[in-house]
Structure formats: structure tokens, C-alpha cells
Amino acid sequence: MLYDILSTFRKKAYYDSAVCVIFDKTHPLEFSHVGPASPDALYDMASVSKIITTTLLLQLMDEGRLHVTDLCLPLLPFLAGPATLRRLGSVTVGQLMTHTSGILPWYPLYADGRPFPVIFEMLMETTPEENGYAYSDLNYMLLGMIYTNLTGMSLREGVENTIAGQFGIPIGYGPVKPAQCAPCCLGNQIEKRMCAERNLPFNGWRPDGTTVSGECNDGNAFYYFNGVSGHAGIFSTASSMMKLCQMYLNTDSPAFVNAMETTVGERGLGFDKSDLFKDGCGHTGFTGTSIYLSRKHEFGVVLLTNRLYLPGGQTPVNNSPCRREVHSYALKMVSTGIA
């Protein structure tokens, strides 16, 4: 049973709370939750936010306003430094979406504080080009900026108008009321350590041990982009993420289908296609969130946990063992017809 899986991993201190729903194209098949957070609590989606940005971009592709093969720099006219022009001159929107742009994986913009074009040019000047696949938050920062440049809308407005308004799915950027949320972390100890390892000082940290609820964990999203970025910042319930995934399971839109069917290494357009998502695709979030959908088997899984919030003082661990067990259980459920 799903509840048993979630309970077992909670006892092993993988998270304080979890909610999970397994569903087909139209209905939930099994729903369970453990821990003190409400089953309809909002979770900090972390990098699953990239799928929200992807959805906004795919809608523009459906409308003919954007193409996978478009060069990215003409869509980012404020990035005009010589190193940026040299490094990204031939990089396409599709390469940003599949993380094959050559851009470094991560950099704490907040530790610098200068305007984004200035920092980005410095990074293009001083960091080596990544070969092949390199998962990078900066790719989706740029994609969020491309959306705003093309539409004239902020990402917050885009999500409100398209995801919540047009698609009828109540998902949005924070901040949100803490009482409606599962706590997402206890300060930013992990990023604090990452900055220290790079000798990058920053004096604006949340105090260690501070319960963060209703504000996103991600440092760049929170400290630098005021909670709204293409790579992080979205809050959602499990039921809302299920509705988004069901839209993907049911769609016949060429742009949306292509995003799931494209395979570059272990990536689709925005989606992760690694073996964590057998016969399908999905995405994970640093806070312990994930989505998984399989058009082949016509089902999906939303698993939301708060792995960085461990009030017992345990060290956070990677949530993928829990994801794998839940995904295997769900796949067995739909393939054997026991749902």
C-alpha cells in the first residue's frame, strides 16, 4: 500500500511530511499522506517549477510565437557582452530546455548582487563551457526571461493568466500563507556550505534552524529574484500538480507531445527522462518534490515531500529511493490492473 511506503520512508527521516497521488488520465487512483502537514498543503516545488516555465513556453510554441530551433540571444537582447555573444551565439531555445547549452550548473547570484547581465557576462568570461549535458538552473532563468521578453508579462502574470486562468489549475508563485504550507526547510545550510566552498561570502542568510514556510527555499529565487524565477519559486498542492500532469497525459498538442517525446541524452524538452521515470518523463525538486507521467501507460504520480525540514536535527538525504519505490508500486498497479 502507498501509505506503508510513505510511512516507512518517514520513519527513516527522509522527510517530515509527504503527500502522494497516483492517477490515470481522468481520476485519482490512490491518494495517501503522512506527517503533520495537511493533505491539501502547499509545497515548495523547487525545480519542478521548471515544468511550469516549460508549460508557458510550450503554449507560446503552440501559438507559433516561439520555436525550439530559435536562437536564444535575439530573445534576450539585454545580454550583449562579448563573452556572452561568443558563448551563446549559436545556442537555441531547445538547448536551454534540454540543458545542453554549455552553461555552468549553478552560481549564487545573490552573493554578487549586481544586475543579471553583468553577472552573466562575468560567468561567460570566467567559467569553462560545459560539454554535453549539464543540468543548470541558469538555463531556466534565461527561459523565464525569454517568456517575459516575448509576452511582456512577468512569470507571475503568465502563471496566473495561463496556468491558473486558461488551464484552470491553481498553481502559483509565493509567498503564500505559512498556515497553508508544509514547512520547506530550516534555513539555507546547504547553499551556505556551497557558497563557503566557493569562497563566496553572503551576509543575508536566514538564520540556521529557522523554519521556512510560505517562502521558497532556493537561494537565487528567494534572495535574488524576489521569489519568482524560471527555475524555482512555484507552490502547489498535490491535487493541482495532478491536474497539470493529466493535461499532459490527455493533450494532442504537437508542442506538448514533442516536449515529452524528444530525447536528448536523458532529457526531453524541460522533462527528465532518466530511469527514475520508466516509460515516461517527469521532474524532481530539491525540496523533495517530483512528478512522473507516462503516456504509454496512461498514468502519473505526484509525490510531494519536505525532505529539508527535519525538526529532529537529522541530515537531509536524497529522496530518490522513495521516489523509485513509489514509482515502481504505481507502475505495477496500472500494469496489473489492480487499481
Image (cartoon, helix red, strand yellow):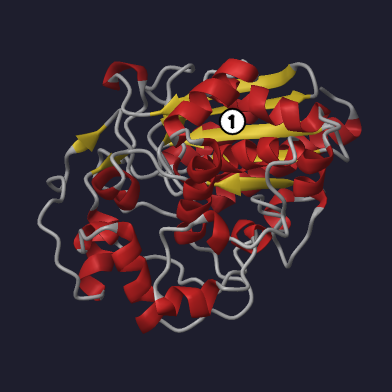
Could you say where residue 38 lies in the image, as x and y percent from the top left?
42, 17
Which residue is pictured at 75% across the width and 16% down the height?
Answer: 27
Q: Quadrant of residue 16?
A: top left
Could you say where residue 49 lies in the image, as x and y percent from the top left?
51, 40
Which residue is pictured at 23% across the width and 56% down the height?
Answer: 110
Location of mark 1 (residue): 4
Q: Quadrant of the N terminus?
A: top right
Mark 1 packing: few (<14 Cα in 10 Å), some, or many (20+)? few
Which residue occupies the foreground of this view, 183 or 116?
116
Q: Is residue 278 above or below residue 167?
A: below
Residue 171 in sight here: no
Q: Quadrant of residue 187?
A: top left
Could you say where residue 10 lies in the image, as x and y percent from the top left?
45, 37
Which residue occupies the foreground of this view, 185 or 240?
240
Q: Is residue 313 left or right of residue 273?
A: left
Q: Quadrant of residue 161?
A: top right
Which residue is pictured at 57% across the width and 45% down the height?
Answer: 322
Which residue is pictured at 10% across the width and 57% down the height?
Answer: 203
Q: Quadrant of the C terminus?
A: top right
Dot 1 lies on which element? helix
Q: How many numbered discs, if any?
A: 1
